[in-house]
Image (cartoon, coloured by chain):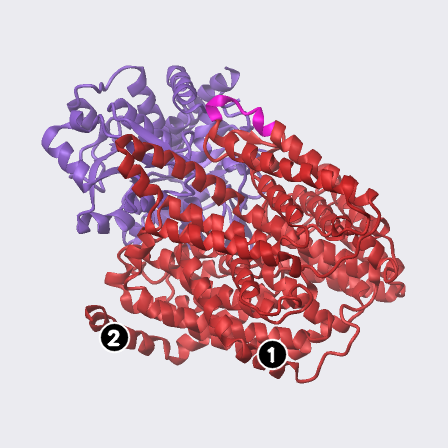
Chain colours: A red, B purple
Amino acid sequence: MDLFATALPELSEAFGMILNPSVLGFLVLGVVMGLCVGIFPGLGGIAGLSLLLPFMFGMEPLFGLALMVGMVAVVPTSDTFASVLMGIPGSSASQATVLDGFPLAKKGQAARALSAAFTSSLFGGILGATFLTFFILAARPIVLMFQTPELLMVTVFGLSMVGILAGRVAIKGLVAAGLGLLVGTIGEGASSGALRMSTFDTPYLMDGLKLVIVGLAIFAVPEIVALLRRDRAISDRQVLGGGWLAGIKSWWQNKWLSVRCSLIGVAVGVIPGLGGSVVDWIAYGHAVQTSKDKSQFGSGEIRGVIGPESSNNAKEGGGLVPTLLFGIPGSGSMAIFISGVALLGTGQIEVGPSMINNNLNFTYAIVWLLALANVVGTVICIVASGGIARLTNIRFALLAPFLFMIISFAAFQSRQSLWDLVALFGIGLLGILMRRFDWSRPAFLIGFVLATPAERYTNQAFQIANSRFRQGMEQGLDYIFSPIVIVLIIVTIVSVFFGLRQSKNIQAEGNVNSGGKRAPLIFLLAITGYIGLAYWNAALIPDFARMDRIFPVFVATVSLVGCAVLLIQMRFKPESDPLFADREVEDAEVDAYGLWSTLAWFAALLIATSLVGFILALAAFLLLFIRYRAQKSWTFAGLYTAAGIVFICSMAATLNRDFPPGLLQTFVDLPWPLT
Amino acid sequence: MRLIEHTIGASLIALATGVVMAGTAQAEGDGLDLAGETVEWIIPFSETGGSARWANFYAPLLKEALPGNPTVVVTFMPGAGSTRGANHFQGLEYEDGTTIFGSSGSTQFPYLLNDPRVRYEYGDWNVVLASGTGGVVYLPADLAGTLESDGIEAIAEENFIYGSQGATRLDLVPLLAWELLGLNVEPVFGIEGRGDGRLMFERGEANIDYQTSSSFLSGVTPLVEAGTAVPWFTFGSLDADGNIVRDPTFPDLPTFTEVCEAAPSCETSGTAYDAWMAFFTAGFPAQKMVFLPAGAPQEAIDTYSAAFKAITEREDFEEISLTQLGVYPQMTGAAAKAALASATVVPDEARTFVIDWLADRYGVVLQ
C-alpha cells in the first residue's frame, strides 16, 4: 500500500504533464517521424533517434521526451508494413511476423493481416504500459534476481524455440540452428580475443556479422529473388475491401493470445542483456504451441501475426525498466535514448538508479507517453494500411530493384563498407538455398541471434560458478540451481518435448515437395563442409584461449553428428522422402526466369559497385534492369532511375551517410554522393 | 621498434610545437570561416558507447562556437575495437577543416601495445581538445568492512570476481592495480559496457568493480547511499608535474598510490608500478581527444582550439557538463598537446612488461 501512496500522486502529476497541447504536438511529430523511419527495412530506432539527437540539447525536457518516446514507440508498429507486404523483416523485432504475414498478403489478405498486426501492437503497447505502471516500483529486486545462470537459461529457452520451428525434418532444423550459432561466433571471441573463422587480415569478419545484414539476407533476399523469378505481383488477387475491419475482428477472436504474448514481451524486455531480438520468436512459438489447429502456420495463419506483433510493442515498455532503473540500455536505441535524455534541459533528469526516487513523475510520463504514442501510431497505420496494401498488386519486377536498393542501403548502415554488400549477397545465397531445400531459416536466425549471449553467459556462469564452488559445494549449487533456473529448465523441457512432437505438423515455411536426390545431397555436403571447417578452425585455438574454443567446438560437434545422421538417412530413404525437399522442382511451372540469371543481376550490381562505387553502379543497374528485365521503355527506365537515385541520396543526406566507394574513387576525387 | 622511435620523435615534435603554439595561439580573429559547411566528426565506435555520449554532448556546443556556425554531425564508424575508424582517419588528408576525429583510451591502448591492426600514427594528427576522466574502485559493504578493520591482508585470500570488457582495454589499469595490491581477482570477460559490470556487482556476482567518474556519480552513488557499495580508492589525477594527486571530483578518497604505499606487499616503484603509471597516464588524464587530420594548417588548428576553449569557458559549462563529463580538465592548446604527448608514449619496459603480463596471466596474445 505504501507503494501506491507514493505512486498515485506522481501518476496523476504525470498525466497532467503529458496532457498538454504542446507535449502532444511533439509526441505526434515524433510518432510521424518514427513511422517514416520504421517503414524502411533495416532502419529502426537507432537511425531515428540519431536524427533527433542534435535537437535535444537544452530542449524543454518534456518536449524532448515526447519527441523521442514517440519515435521509439512506433518503430515496431510501422516495420510491420515491410514484413507483411514484402516478406522483408522491417526490423529485428518483426522477423517472426514475416512467416505468416507474408503468406496472408500473397492470398490478398494484406489489409487484414496489417490491421490485425496494428491492433495487436496497440494492445501490446498499452498492456505493457499498464503493467509497467505497477511493476516499475517493484521491478528493481526482481531484475536483480536474474543472475548469469538465469540469463543463460532464458537464452536456452529462446533456443528451444528451434524445436517448434525446425520444420518437417527435425534434424535439419537442428543443424540449421547449429549453423546459425556457428555463423554467430565468427570473429573475435569475447573471453581471450581468439579469432574464429577470421584473421587479422580480414578485419571485416573480426567484428562478426551484424544482425541487420543476416536478417535481411536470410529472409528478404530469397523472397525478392523468388518473386522476381515468378514475375508477377505479390498477390494476384484484388486486395479485399474493408479488410482492416476483418483484421480487428481476428484480433478480438484471439485477444487472450494477445494478452499472453504481450506479457511475454514485457517480461523478456525487462531482462537486461538479452535484447529484444528473440521476443518475437518466443511469442510465435507460444502462438503455435497454444493453437489447436496448427496446419495453417507458415501458410497464412493470423495467430502467427498477432502473437509476435503483440509482443514486440510490449517489449519496448519492458525495455524501459533496465534503461530507466539501472541506466543500462536494453537495446541500441535505448542507449541513444539515454544520451538524449542527458542532453535535455539542464540535464536534471538522470537515467539510472536514482530515477525512481528523484524523477518518478518523469518516469510515469515516459511510460504513458509510450502508451499514447502507440495509440496515435496505430490509428495512423490503420488508416494508411488500405492504400499501402495495394503495393502487393504492382508487378514485382518494378518493385524489386527499389527494394533491393533499400536493403542494400540498410545493409551498409552496419559498417559503410563494400563488404556489407558482399555479406548481404553471400548470406542471401545461403538463404536462397535454405529456402529451396526446405532448411528452416527461422532456426538458423534464432541460432545466429542467440550465439553471442549463449556463449557469453555459458562462459561467465561457468567461471563464476567455479569460484562459488571453491567457497563450498552448497554455495555453488545454490548459485546454479536457483528457483528461477529450475522453473526455466522445466519450461524448456516441456516446450522442446511438445515442440518436437508437433513439429511435423508445423511447416513454418509452407509445404515443399521432394525432387531428385542429387541437389539436396550437394547442399548438405556443403553445409557439412562449412561446419567441419568451423570445427577445425576452432579446435586450433590454443589452450590459453580455451574459453573461446569450447563453445564453437561443442556446437560444431553436435551439428556434425546431425549432418552424419542426415547423410546416413539420405543413403537409405527414397527420393520422395521430405528429406529431399526441393522447391526448385515444385516451382518450375510458375517460374518465368532461372535462378542464376536472376542472381546475376544482383551479382553485377555488386561487382559494378566495387569498380565505380555504389551510386554509379546503382544508376546503371536500375536503368538496365527496368529496360531489359522489366521490358519498359527507355523513358520509363530513365525516370525510374532518376527517382530511385534522388530518393536514396536524400535518405543518405538526411542520415548523413556515405556510399561505399569503388576502385574508380581511389583514382579520381568525385563529389558526394559519388565518393 | 621503428614505430616506437617514430612515436617518441613525433611526441617530442608535438611537445616542441606545443610550446611554440602556446605563444602564438592567442592571435585569434582571422581563422577559418565555416559558414554553410558541414563538419563531420568521426567517432570510431557505435552510437551506443561512451565516446558517442561525449561527442553528442560537444557537437551542438561546437556548432555554436565555430566561426560561421557550421552544422556539426557525428559520424559513427565502429569496427575492430576502434582501430578501423582510426586507420580510416589516418588515410585522410586535410582539405578544408570539415573532418575531425574523436579518439578514446581504447584507441590509445592498441597503439601502445603494438596491436597488428594499428595503421595509425598519433604523431601525424593535430590535437585540439583532450578530455580527462578518473576512475573509482568500489567494494561490497561486507568486504569493505573487513578491509577497514583488518587491513588489506584480510582480503588477499578472497576470490574476487570482476566483470571485464577485456584485458587489453581500459580494464588493464584496474586489473594491474589489483594485481599490484596482491588481490586475487578473476576477471569475467565478455561484459559489453561498464554498466553491465555494475549490474553484475549489484546482482552480487561480481564483488569488486570500478567505474569512470561520471558513471560512478550517476550509477554507484545511489548504491553507496543505500549502503550496498563502498568506494575504496580512485586512480587519482595528474598534477602539472605529472605526479599523482587526489582526484578533484573525489577529494576524500585515497588514490591508488596512497593505498599501495600503505599496503606491505605493494611498492610504488619498480617495473610493475611504472607500467601501471604509464598505462594510467595513457588511459585516463587524456582519455578522449579531438584531432584534425595530418597536414592541417595552423589557422585551422587555432580556430578549433579557440572554439573548444570558448566552450569550456562558457559560464554554464560546469553545470551542463557535470553529469556528462564529470569535473575534469578539458584541455585545449598547449595543455592538450602535452596531454597527447604523455598519453601516447609508454617506456619500452612498461610495454614489454604489460605484453608479457597479459600473455602469462590472461593468455592474451597480440600478434
Q: Looking at the image, which is closer to me, B193 or A112?
A: A112
Chain letter of the residue carrying label 1: A
Q: Please rate how many residues cluster around mark 2, counting C-alpha atoms within 10 Å: few if below 14, some from 14 to 19, many from 20.
A: few
- Same-chain check, marks 2 and 1: yes
Residue at (60, 59) in percent of width and height: A502
Looking at numbered disc 2 in the image, what kind of residue is underneath it? Leu
Q: Which residue is mark 2?
A: A8
- Queried whether the magenta region covers residue A539, the answer comes back as yes
Residue at (47, 18) in percent of width and height: B4
Residue A349 appears in the rendering: yes
Chain letter of the residue carrying label 2: A
Residue A220, percent across and down? 69, 56
Q: Is residue A20 above or below residue A358?
A: below
Q: Quadrant of residue A628?
A: bottom right
Main SS of residues in magenta: helix
Local SS, label 2 = helix
